[in-house]
Amino acid sequence: MEKELVIYNLEEKEKAAIERSQIFQVPGGKELETKVIVVLGKAGMGKSILVQKICQDWSNGKFSQFEFVFWFECRRLSLPEKQYSLKDLLLELFVKPREGSDKVFEYILKNPDKVLLIFDGFEELQVHDGFTHYSDCQSYKECYSIRELFAGLFQKKILSGCTLLLTARPKDKFSQYLSKVDKIIEMVGFIPQQIESYIARYFEGLPYCDEAVKSIKDCQYLFSHCYSPVICKFICFFCEMMFEMGDKDLPSTLTTLFVKYLQQKLMPTQTDATAIQNQQHITTLAQVAWYLGEKNQNALKSSLFPSKEVKEFALKYGLLLPFTFPNHSGNGEEEFGSAFSDYVIQNFLSAVHLVLAEEIKDKSLTKYLSLPSRKKRPHNWLDLVPRFLPGLLYLQPDPYLFSLSDEHRRKIITKKQKTLLKYIKKIQISELHPKKLLELFHCVYETQDSYLLQHVALRLKPELSFLGTPLTPPDVYVLHFILKRSQKEFSLDLRNSGINLQGLKHLSGLKNVISFRASLSDVVRLWESLEETKEYELLRISVEKFGIDPFKAEKMKDISDLSDLVHMQDMEDASGCNFYEIPAIKNLRKLEFALGPVCGLQGFLKLVDILAAFSSLQHLDLDALSENEIGDEGAKRLCEVFSKLTSLETLNLSQNKITDLGAEQLATALPSLASLKTLSLYNNYICDAGAENIARILPAMASLRVLHVQCNKITDAGAQKLTDSLRKCPHIESVAMWNPTIPYGVLEYLQQLDSRISLL
């Protein structure tokens, strides 16, 4: 599965917002082949809302390339014992034409390119494992299981030419098939401006509108969670409920938010007689939430519910929502089911079950936190449980939720709290993987326990790397919260983390963060933003702390971003101060260039334009496994800036298709590199003429210690010239000279003349 995911990598993606109208544009797609498009996004990011909007747009005349759109909620197809034909799936289960279904189906078969099939919530399909291995489904007339039917569609064996749109969570089962789809789109949630717009519109017209908006924004932890549309909606709803009741204080954690939500839901109608009954209902509902979560589900048939009373209780208070399964029986009766109103409610109740269940203790409890490195979380579906669980265990006694007046129940929870504390104290915090470290931060933050927070803060290593680890706004908040409590000084690596501008500003501004790295484009945007808002002191601090050493360019964007950074040195802000000497540029010691053959020369010519700015550059590496192929033209342009690279000690020009012409140009300019110690020209196209030119200038290169010219096209004549030159170069320590065009006996003879010659 991990190998399949290589193509779906945060470092390889370029962020670009797209319009809904662009979703079905597949570059290079064959006209008669099925197109498979996947929309990925964490739970609550709005995938289902997007699907509904696409259907609405289509009904209003957009997406006119489709004459038929079929939308399937996968939770309603989760009956593995049933079998269907393709016609059943399209025209019987959810949509049944009043007349002429045979003609409609015949038209669909003849015009598959006019059909869009949407499978929403793929992870809720109970039979989604291994469907790419099924090859039986090749006939539209036969009946198959949902797994076989889906396999036939996905493998383009039935209804070939249609368009499949699937929505799924990034970490669930569908991830293993991403290499087989035509287009991947990710929903990343609200940006800060959208959060503020949503909250403002939610409270628009209410007498306490401004006060409610300010209340949410002031509670920074909850506000950070508003990047998730479903949580943003819930927080707004909760805030409205609290303001209506005259309580304007919002909780500081997610756990207390949901506890208060249940309190406010139950308290107005609760009496002493119903309190115990409600608590029993919550306990049973929590068991159901956990049972379904373990199976990666959130819905259950009504007939399978533990009791009618519990189901009605959950429906009454909005914890469950009803829906219908497709009609499978001949009597026309519908089968009803219930699903948790959103994934956060299910996660919260699942954590309640772990807290209350007597049979879950010690290792059975802590394994659901999955904090030690190299261990995967058992249930990706319940990804918020590790946050709610510690929060609930450290919660103050709450009679409305846990019956903590029950002495036996209180002892159980106290024991589990001690187990959690002991578990966290044993964790080697400095060795945790970045994702696990962030999860630990969330866990201890939810407890709001001063000892635990201080324990974690004191055991962090000074160099914290989140390279390639996605940082959501809540991640950034808890990271900032923990770092601020520590007395240590930290260096942060935030490259390719997707951190937003506000988060980058807050972390880089911490007094005990003495240096940081981040994606260049993000840093440039941050500095431009700080200049625009006239936060000159923070701008100065950020510029001083930022570093880029060592820097590796792997895409054209890396070169463009580096160029933008260099050009900022020429800017002058409104305060009159300028960036004439950005420390990150001045202090760059090592620069690696690995764009490959397609963009190698183009990118290198752009890099050469700014190389002179790096006055402290010591190591310039132009060797890449995919070969950059800068050729003689690149070598010529590089020679033009040698005089400016006064600190350069290592120059690696290996595998770049440099010929004798390039070698001649290099020989003319190389003596100006007064500090050069290592020169590598391995695996180029240099022949005897080039070797002779290099031999000629070796005595003038007094600092040179190591030379690599192996795997070129040098013959024994060129090798002899180099050997002769070595007699005048006592400063040179080794020369790698093996070439397939030099007889081995000649090389052995030359090595006998000069032991510094290497045959490797």
Image (cartoon, rainbow, N blue to C red):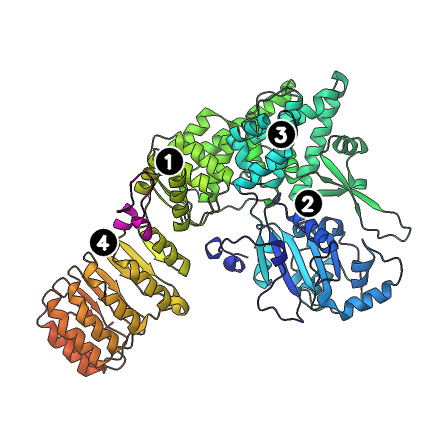
Q: Nearer the viewer, residue 149 or 190?
A: 190
Of the residues tagged 2 and 4, which is closer to the observer?
Answer: 4
The residue depicted at 65 percent of the width and 56 percent of the height is 166
Residues under numbered marks 4 and 3 in contact, where contact means CB atoms less than 8 Å apart:
no
What span is colored magenta in the figure?
567-587
For marks 4 and 1, the one nearer the N-term is: 1
Q: CA distance from mark 4 to mark 1?
A: 29 Å
For marks 2 and 4, the one nearer the N-term is: 2
The amino acid type of the residue labelled 4 equals: Ser
The residue carrying mark 4 is 615
The residue depicted at 24 percent of the width and 77 percent of the height is 661
Q: CA distance from mark 4 to mark 3?
A: 56 Å
Q: Is 529 on the left or on the right of 289, as rendered?
A: left
The residue carrying mark 1 is 535
Residues under numbered marks 3 and 2 in contact, where contact means CB atoms less than 8 Å apart:
no
Badge 4 local density, few (<14 within 10 Å), some, or many (20+)?
some
- Residue 258, which numbered label? 3
Can you tell which quarter of the image residue 411 is in? top right
Residue 29 position, x and y percent, is 61, 68
Residues under numbered marks 2 and 4 in contact, where contact means CB atoms less than 8 Å apart:
no
Q: CA distance from mark 3 to mark 2?
A: 21 Å
For marks 3 and 2, the one nearer the N-term is: 3
The residue carrying mark 2 is 297
Q: Nearer the viewer, residue 115 or 688?
A: 115
Q: CA distance from mark 2 to mark 1?
A: 48 Å
Of the residues tagged 4 and 1, which is closer to the observer?
Answer: 1
Q: CA distance from mark 2 to mark 4?
A: 59 Å
The residue depicted at 63 percent of the width and 57 percent of the height is 21
